[in-house]
Image (cartoon, helix red, strand yellow):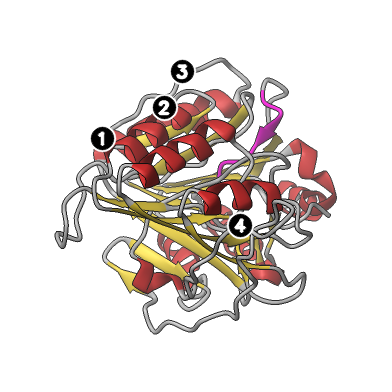
């Protein structure tokens, strides 16, 4: 079983209102010896489970995903890094039985998690394949319904974590976005090369995610609110430090289960960035990667907001903004 932070040595960031997070931000600084004094915090509770196309976990549960699968009439295309959810498996099998074309791509490096789903789906009329060897990981988590909407998730379909993981799901109905995701799915399913299109506001790895994220950080003039499951990208860290030095209020909420990001967090804290993290191996877990820039004081809006996960150079991911 992979550690719940799905990619080793990969920084992951993304955007959402702090009020949704349930993460208590604490002022932190650098302690002697270079270790950040930012401490573990208790999981907060939030009554927010949905805002327009945004679904907030763990409060919302995965019924919205199941409902979309059960309502599909023509096609369902799933790309999933980890898949261990019997409800979703059975719903996909039921869709296939009623004549819906169901196709699934599962990450080949997560076979220990995915093998049961692979076998079940393959024996129930679902066209299932392992991910391409062209990518070290296929870390993408998307569900395309009838070619008209796509669920883009930070979460895997792994039910054992639903109750304790902070994740976000976006239901994207922009025609250009859904078309771009479908084009990539078709190529990945056939193991063919493809350069993803950004649609209206998509961000892809390994194509352009880091560039977009750097642009997002560099464009902030008032504040940055960041969820980061991991912190291990010096380019991103340096951009955050530059933002803090020009007066942007930067806050980071993430994970640091074994103290592995102490050095990175200390570096950020010395620049005046406020950091809180969770460090329990069994409790509430920050799995999502979102950042929210505010480019003008008190507006609460940013047209440049993008959800992205910078990852190793050969990792397939997609996020929507």
CA gap, disc 2 to disc 3?
16 Å
CA gap, disc 2 to disc 1?
16 Å
Mark 3 or 4, nearer chain start:
4
Residue on which the image places disc 2: 211
> Element at badge 1?
loop
Q: In the shown orientation, is residue 194 left or right of residue 249?
A: right
In the rendered view, tell whether residue 219 sits above or below residue 157.
Answer: above
> Is residue 176 magenta-colored?
no
Count residues near mark 4 (Cα–Cα under 10 Å), then give few for <14, some for 14-19, many for 20+.
many
Q: Do the residues labelled 4 and 1 touch (CB within 8 Å)?
A: no
Question: Marks 2 and 4: which is nearer the front?
Answer: 4
Q: In the shown orientation, is residue 179 left or right of residue 261?
A: left
CA gap, disc 3 to disc 4?
42 Å
Residue nearer the viewer, 291 or 197: 291
Count residues near mark 2 (Cα–Cα under 10 Å), then give few for <14, some for 14-19, many for 20+.
few
Residue at 64% from the left image edge and 30% from the top image edge = 312
Q: In the shown orientation, is residue 168 left or right of residue 173?
A: right
Mark 2 or 4, nearer chain start:
4
In the rendered view, tell whether residue 67 sits above or below residue 289.
Answer: below
Residue 144 seen in render: yes
CA gap, disc 1 to disc 3?
16 Å
Residue on which the image places disc 4: 30
Mark 2 or 3, nearer chain start:
3
Q: Main secondary structure of the magenta part?
A: loop
Residue numbers of the magenta segment:
135-140
In the rendered view, tell whether residue 142 sits above or below residue 17.
Answer: above
Mark 1 or 3, nearer chain start:
3
Residue nearer the viewer, 140 or 41: 41
């Amino acid at each position: 079983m992979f550690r719940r932070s799905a990619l080793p040595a990969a920084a992951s960031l993304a955007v959402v209102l702090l009020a949704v997070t349930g993460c208590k931000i604490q002022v932190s600084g650098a302690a002697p010896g270079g270790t950040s004094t930012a401490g573990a915090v208790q999981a907060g509770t939030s009554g927010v489970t949905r805002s327009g196309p945004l679904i907030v976990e763990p409060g919302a549960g995965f019924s919205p995903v199941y409902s979309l699968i059960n309502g599909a009439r023509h096609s369902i295309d799933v790309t999933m890094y980890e898949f261990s959810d019997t409800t979703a498996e059975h719903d996909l099998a039921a869709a296939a039985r009623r004549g819906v074309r169901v196709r699934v791509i599962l990450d080949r490096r997560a076979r220990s998690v995915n093998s049961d789903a692979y076998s079940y789906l393959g024996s129930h009329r679902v066209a299932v394949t392992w991910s391409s060897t062209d990518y070290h990981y296929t870390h993408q988590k998307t569900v395309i319904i009838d070619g008209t909407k796509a669920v883009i998730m930070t979460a895997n379909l792994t039910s054992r974590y639903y109750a304790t993981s902070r994740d976000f799901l976006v239901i994207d109905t922009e025609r250009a976005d859904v078309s771009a995701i479908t084009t990539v799915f078709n190529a990945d399913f056939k193991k063919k090369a493809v350069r993803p299109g950004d649609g209206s506001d998509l961000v892809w790895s390994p194509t352009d995610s880091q560039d977009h994220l750097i642009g997002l950080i560099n464009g902030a003039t008032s504040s940055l609110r960041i969820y980061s499951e991991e912190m291990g990208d010096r380019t991103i860290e340096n951009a955050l430090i530059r933002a803090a030095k020009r007066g942007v209020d930067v806050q980071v909420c993430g994970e640091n289960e074994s103290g592995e990001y102490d050095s990175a967090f200390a570096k950020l804290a010395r620049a005046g960035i406020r950091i809180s993290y969770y460090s329990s191996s069994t409790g509430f877990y920050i799995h999502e990667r979102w950042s929210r820039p505010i480019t003008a004081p008190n507006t609460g809006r940013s047209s440049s907001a993008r959800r992205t996960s910078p990852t190793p150079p050969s990792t397939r991911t997609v996020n929507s903004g």
